[in-house]
Image: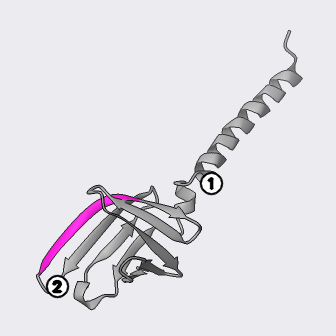
Amino acid sequence: MISRKKVIIGGVVVVSIIVAVIVIYYAILPNSPLKNTGVSGIYDSTNLAQAGSYVELRSDGTAFFHYEYNWTEASSGYTGTWELRDGNRIFATTNQGLAGYFRIDGNNLIDEQGGDVYVKRR
């Protein structure tokens, strides 16, 4: 016969395993939604030649990159993904194969290749 004590211990073990899996998924894995919540948001370009351009970093690791080219009145948008690395660097890729790094500096997202600065919307 199974004692009540063994049932309680078994229940505690099962709950502990479930909690551990949730903590690993949400707090430890690279694309964890909790890691991305402070960084995620919409960042607007400060470049006057590209006014209206923005980068949207979603907490689920997906992204949208919208570019306005004011001198040609053209615009384009790309979907993609992003990953926070080294605490303040973001590696982003588009579904078209473009890739690059951004750096987080406070509320600014800085394109490490072109130097463009994007400011987080409030």
- The quadrant in which residue 22 appears is top right
Tally the numbered discs: 2
Alpha carbons under labels 1 and 2: distance apart: 41 Å
Which residue is depicted at the point 45% across and 55% down? 60
Alpha-carbon neighbours of circle 2 within 10 Å: few (<14), some, or many (≥20)?
some
Q: For numbered disc 2, what is the local secondary structure?
A: loop
Q: Are marks 1 and 2 in contact (CB under 8 Å)?
A: no
Instruction: Please say if 53 is above or below 92.
Output: below
**Spot occupied by residue 41 in the image (x, y as percentages of width and height):** 43, 70
Left of 113 or right of it: where is 17? right
Q: Position of residue 65 (x, y in %)?
A: 30, 68
Q: Is residue 104 above or below residue 84?
A: below
Residue extending furthest toward the front: 113
Q: Amino acid at mark 2?
A: Asn
Coloured how?
A: one colour
Which residue type does callout 1 highlight? Ala
Q: Mark 1: few, some, or many residues within 10 Å (few <14, many ≥20)?
A: some
Q: Which residue is mark 1?
A: 27
Please identify the quarter of the rendering in which residue 34 is found.
bottom right
Q: Nearer the viewer, mark 1 or mark 2?
A: 2
Q: Is residue 66 left or right of residue 63?
A: left
- The answer to whether residue 67 is above or below residue 2 is below
Magenta stretch: dominant secondary structure:
strand
Q: Left or right: 90 with respect to 12?
A: left
Mark with earlier residue (1, 2): 1
Q: Kindly identify which numbered label has been placed on residue 89.
A: none
x then y, percent, for residue 63: 36, 62
Residue range (magenta):
73-81
Q: Tell me the tag on residue 70.
A: 2
* Quadrant of residue 61 within the rendered picture: bottom left
In reply to whether residue 79 is colored magenta, the answer given is yes
- Identified at 53% across, 82% down, the residue is 106
